[in-house]
């Protein structure tokens, strides 16, 4: 345990700051998802058809190259055979020709049947799959544009972005030490697959092409591309409207001496920019495949992808291709995702790729607070105020210049705290040109959000808030706030009293540019150096180790398109990822490009573990969120010890693999003696006992470590030689398997020559197969009706019992909606005759959740008297017709994708009309770890009866 304590002390020391001035603001501003605490009935949205994440009828066909004849084109052979089977039934698209991916995009003519996601003819796909040299047929899916946790455009070095050297993200990770040693990324080429890069930015070199920092790249999509329409590519990857890619580029490669006291992690690296996002919408993964293969073909050493979609599966097309690029010897750094408040098993694709480096986020050790000053009204000196803008954005400069603002108060009583708690009277003027003085209501009859809403109704833009008990100003709406500090509240009270005597008073906000600057750097004592709350949790549904490592990603200052302000502060794993990419470039420069194949192992084995909190003796954070820990660049550069493997994968208890052999190679010039020990991280409880849904908001951490036995605790290894030991890890006895706990930790090796390396481990101390796939705990998702169910389009009520509908009025036919508790490798929707007997696991909608026993699964029955096991296999279930099928689906995410809604089908997937008759929908979702051919491995739901009448 001692080694971990030493490393925690190191992290803590990196977050030490100089003493603060007497007037330094001390409030904590921390972004949170406002919807997680919402009681607004609108959060429980109307049940309606949900947008597809797949492009209807579009697929990527992977092809093997087996012919030795150079004049034979496997793509042409495939298209020729496909034309025989589906004459005039498809359109050929992009052909991929790369050592890492060979295939072709196609679009079937049958598409958007029933408005279902990627509805397609099952028979057609089976036919395509049987063509020679076809490896796989995968649907084209949409990856959403990156979602930012926090965004601030800043106007000068005196805005809240400049940190002293002792508090920089470079100091946290040792990047400054690497720079001092001459490692700056020179000779390394880094590809950025994102929304483009504003290469005209002076700090990014001011040009495009050979001889500039941004040496090449392309625009795959154009401004008007939205992920669905046709892209219009060109040769210029200029970031004209996004900002995200330019910010990423600055984190990697911003030139130093730019006035903001920052530099790129690898500021002498060459950059390649591949634009894949238009000005709106997402991107089809087929374009991402194109960009990945282009980066590979253009000989990028490191590929950065600050993008992704909540997943948990490693088999998506883009995850597979990204993993192959990594296997081919390139460092592929991908964001783990920003869904940390939604619970476990949600690492984004393509970060789920088996060989890529999925990157989590660590909070930086300090926050800069903007100290604005109110003009000398009551004293001889300026009065400092802290500024906040909302929602979830803090410390922007107050964008008002230095013009005078008339003061406006609703009361002459400075102690009145119920002001603006009701809609403002008609005689209250337009408030857009006033500075409003108002006591923040935190304890009165209304709340702060009510005040803000009422002020905004009168166009309020600037408010001076005060309160004697003020410690936190919550975020809401879109106001700019000048917030008084605790020791200046008395002056705010005086301001109200003085205003009552002098109604014509005005106030200005001087923009301070002297040596004091306009900012105060406040140590982030709450979570500086800890995992960011927004950083997504792993592992994958197959138990793979995700994320791999973490890097600083909270409140990062970097470049922004010149037309959009030139500089910005953003937060997210999108910012941690380029930091990791730049760090990898420094390691490649130091160790040689051959180190790319082992980069993930090098970074994982040398990372610094972080705790759950800053409380003394706090448990180490789960590796399911922090990965192996915070990247440690100097250690990665100099380490002479090589471990294999560096990830110990335990799987779940149904497939538990506790016995592992670890090899230790000493590449130093002298013998090393290693002291071997075990450090356990906190164990997570991912699912509440008795619920089908996973925990969202904060995942509980408990002290329930795995039991670890080492075959040796001391090893001496001669230079250039290897030794090995075995480790046996057993699930913790103190953790309830029904909560599907994630156990993790490190097997550590302290070498006598100064090497400290580790092999992280992770496993699920429960059986994932027992987790219910189709959710029945609908209240936990804040839904207004119990799902799965048929929902009346007009009343939004659940259909109970049989009901007839007219095919001539399709808009009146109900919606079918369901939610997923877990991810599923396969979800199938079929239409069955009303009289077909099917054995089900999910009952018709009720307010009682289905409880799954760990010893025996409960079965419910919609057809009385059915007995026996004659419906054992999937294919034996008689269906009237196939409707849709989905592969590698994520679990439902509260507030984002809480359910899937589909129109009740009036056509089958092959395009034929459903004849009049009595039907039910059959939904089958494969449980995690189940076998697709076995009906008993599915959660099965049969809907109420629907009569379709001509």
Image: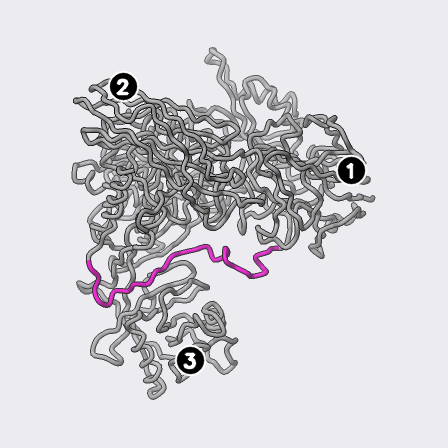
Tell me the distance, in whole angstroms, between the alpha carbons under discs 2 and 3: 74 Å
Select label 2 or label 3 by which is in front: 2
Q: Alpha-carbon neighbours of circle 2 within 10 Å: few (<14), some, or many (≥20)? A: some
Say which of 363 and 216 sits in front.
363
Rendering quarter of residue 404: bottom left
Out of 592 and 16, give the one closest to the viewer: 16
Dot 2 or dot 1, earlier in sequence: 2
User: Which residue, given by chain and number where applicable, does mark 2 sit on?
Assistant: 722
Q: Residue at x 23, y 66 (%)?
A: 512
Q: Nearer the viewer, residue 232 or 924?
A: 924
Q: Which residues are magenta?
A: 19-45
Judge whether residue 546 is colored magenta.
no
Q: Is residue 339 left or right of residue 615?
A: right
Q: Residue at x 54, y 20 (%)?
A: 76
Tell me the number on the disc at residue 863.
Answer: 1
Residue 497 falls left or right of residue 222: left
Q: Secondary structure at mark 3?
A: loop
Q: Residues within 10 Å of mark 3 (few under 14, many from 20)?
A: some
Q: Mark 2: which secondary structure?
A: strand
Q: Are marks 3 and 1 in contact (CB under 8 Å)?
A: no
Q: Position of residue 105 (x, y in %)?
A: 53, 30
Question: Along the polypeptide, which appears first: circle 3 or circle 1?
Answer: 3
According to the picture, the residue beneath numbered tag 3 turns out to be 416
Residue 944 percent across, percent down from the top left: 75, 44
Q: Quadrant of residue 482?
A: bottom left
Decide whether the magenta segment is chiefly helix, strand or loop.
loop
User: On screen, 345 above or below 878?
Assistant: below
């Amino acid at each position: 345990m001692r080694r971990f304590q030493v490393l925690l002390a190191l992290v803590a020391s990196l977050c030490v700051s100089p003493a603060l001035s007497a007037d330094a603001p001390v409030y904590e501003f921390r972004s949170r998802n406002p919807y997680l605490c919402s009681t607004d009935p609108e959060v429980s949205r109307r049940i309606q058809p949900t947008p597809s994440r797949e492009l209807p009828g579009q697929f990527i066909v992977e092809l093997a190259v087996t012919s030795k004849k150079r004049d034979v084109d496997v793509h042409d052979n495939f298209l020729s055979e496909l034309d025989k089977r589906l004459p005039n039934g498809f359109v050929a698209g992009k052909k991929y020709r790369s050592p890492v991916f060979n295939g072709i995009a196609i679009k079937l003519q049958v598409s958007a049947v029933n408005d279902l996601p990627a509805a397609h003819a099952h028979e057609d796909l089976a036919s395509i799959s049987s063509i020679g040299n076809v490896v796989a047929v995968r649907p084209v899916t949409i990856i959403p544009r990156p979602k930012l946790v926090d965004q601030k455009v800043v106007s000068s070095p005196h805005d809240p972005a400049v940190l002293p050297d002792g508090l920089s993200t470079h100091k946290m990770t040792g990047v400054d030490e690497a720079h001092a040693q001459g490692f700056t990324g020179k000779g390394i080429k880094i590809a950025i697959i994102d929304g483009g890069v504003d290469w005209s930015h002076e700090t990014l070199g001011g040009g495009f092409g050979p001889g500039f920092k941004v040496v090449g790249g392309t625009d795959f999509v154009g401004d008007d591309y939205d992920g669905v329409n046709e892209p219009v590519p060109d040769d210029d990857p200029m970031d004209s409207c996004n900002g995200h890619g330019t910010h990423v580029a600055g984190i990697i490669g911003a030139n130093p001496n730019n006035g903001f006291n920052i530099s790129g992690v690898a500021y002498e690296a060459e950059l390649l920019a591949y634009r894949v996002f238009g000005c709106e919408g997402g991107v089809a993964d087929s374009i991402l495949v194109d960009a990945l293969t282009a980066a590979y073909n253009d000989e990028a050493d490191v590929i950065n992808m600050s993008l992704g979609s909540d997943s948990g599966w490693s088999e998506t097309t883009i995850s597979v291709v990204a993993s192959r690029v990594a296997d081919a010897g390139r460092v592929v750094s991908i964001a783990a995702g920003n869904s940390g408040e939604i619970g476990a098993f949600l690492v984004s694709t393509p970060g789920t790729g088996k060989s890529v480096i999925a990157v989590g986020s660590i909070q930086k050790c300090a926050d800069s607070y903007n100290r604005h000053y109110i003009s000398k009204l009551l004293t001889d000196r300026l009065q400092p105020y802290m500024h906040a803008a909302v929602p979830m954005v803090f410390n922007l400069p107050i964008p008002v210049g230095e013009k005078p603002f008339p003061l406006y108060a609703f009361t002459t009583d400075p102690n009145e705290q119920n002001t603006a708690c009701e809609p403002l009277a008609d005689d209250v003027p337009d408030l857009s040109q006033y500075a409003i003085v108002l006591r923040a209501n935190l304890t009165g009859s209304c709340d702060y959000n009510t005040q803000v809403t009422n002020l905004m109704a009168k166009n309020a833009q600037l408010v001076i808030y005060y309160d004697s008990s003020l410690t936190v100003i919550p975020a809401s709406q879109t106001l700019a706030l000048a917030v008084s500090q605790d020791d200046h509240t008395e002056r705010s009270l005086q301001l109200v009293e003085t205003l009552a005597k002098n109604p014509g008073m005005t106030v200005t906000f001087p923009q301070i540019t002297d040596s004091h600057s306009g900012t105060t750097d406040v140590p982030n004592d709450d979570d500086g150096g800890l995992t960011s709350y927004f950083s997504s949790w792993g592992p994958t549904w197959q138990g793979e180790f995700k994320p791999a490592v973490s890097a600083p990603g909270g409140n990062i200052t970097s470049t922004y398109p010149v037309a959009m302000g030139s500089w910005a502060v953003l937060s997210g794993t999108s910012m941690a990822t380029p930091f990791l990419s730049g760090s990898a470039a420094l390691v490649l420069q130091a160790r040689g490009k051959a180190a790319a194949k082992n980069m993930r192992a090098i970074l994982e084995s040398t990372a610094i573990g972080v705790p759950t909190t800053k409380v003394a003796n706090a448990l180490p954070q789960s590796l399911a969120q922090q990965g192996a820990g915070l990247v440690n660049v100097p250690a990665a550069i100099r380490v002479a010890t090589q471990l294999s493997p560096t990830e110990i994968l335990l799987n779940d208890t149904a497939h538990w693999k506790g016995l592992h052999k670890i090899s230790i190679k000493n590449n130093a010039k002298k013998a090393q003696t290693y002291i071997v020990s075990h450090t356990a991280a906190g164990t997570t409880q991912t699912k509440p006992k008795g619920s089908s849904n996973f925990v969202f908001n904060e995942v509980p951490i408990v002290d329930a470590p795995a039991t670890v036995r080492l075959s040796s605790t001391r090893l001496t290894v001669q230079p250039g030689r290897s030794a090995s030991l075995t480790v046996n890890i057993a699930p913790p006895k103190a953790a309830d398997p029904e909560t599907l706990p994630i156990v993790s930790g490190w097997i550590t090796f302290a070498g006598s020559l100064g090497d400290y390396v580790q092999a992280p481990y992770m496993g699920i101390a429960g059986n994932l197969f027992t987790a219910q796939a189709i959710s029945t705990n609908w209240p936990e998702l804040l839904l207004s009706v119990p799902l799965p169910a048929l929902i009346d389009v007009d009343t939004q009520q659940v259909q109970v019992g049989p009901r007839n509908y007219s095919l001539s009025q399709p808009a009146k036919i109900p919606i079918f909606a369901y939610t997923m508790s877990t991810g599923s490798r396969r979800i199938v929707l079929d239409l069955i005759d009303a009289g077909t007997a099917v054995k089900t696991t999910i009952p018709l909608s009720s307010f009682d959740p289905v409880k799954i026993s760990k010893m025996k699964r409960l079965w419910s029955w919609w057809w009385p008297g059915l007995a026996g096991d004659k419906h054992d296999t999937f294919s034996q279930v008689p269906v009237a017709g196939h409707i849709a099928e989905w592969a590698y689906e994520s679990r439902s995410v509260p507030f984002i994708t809480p359910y899937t809604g589909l129109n009740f089908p009036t056509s089958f997937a092959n395009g034929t009309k459903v004849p009049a008759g009595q039907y039910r929908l059959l939904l089958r979702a494969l449980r995690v770890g189940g076998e697709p051919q076995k009906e008993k491995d599915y959660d099965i739901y049969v809907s109420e009866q629907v009569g379709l009448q001509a």
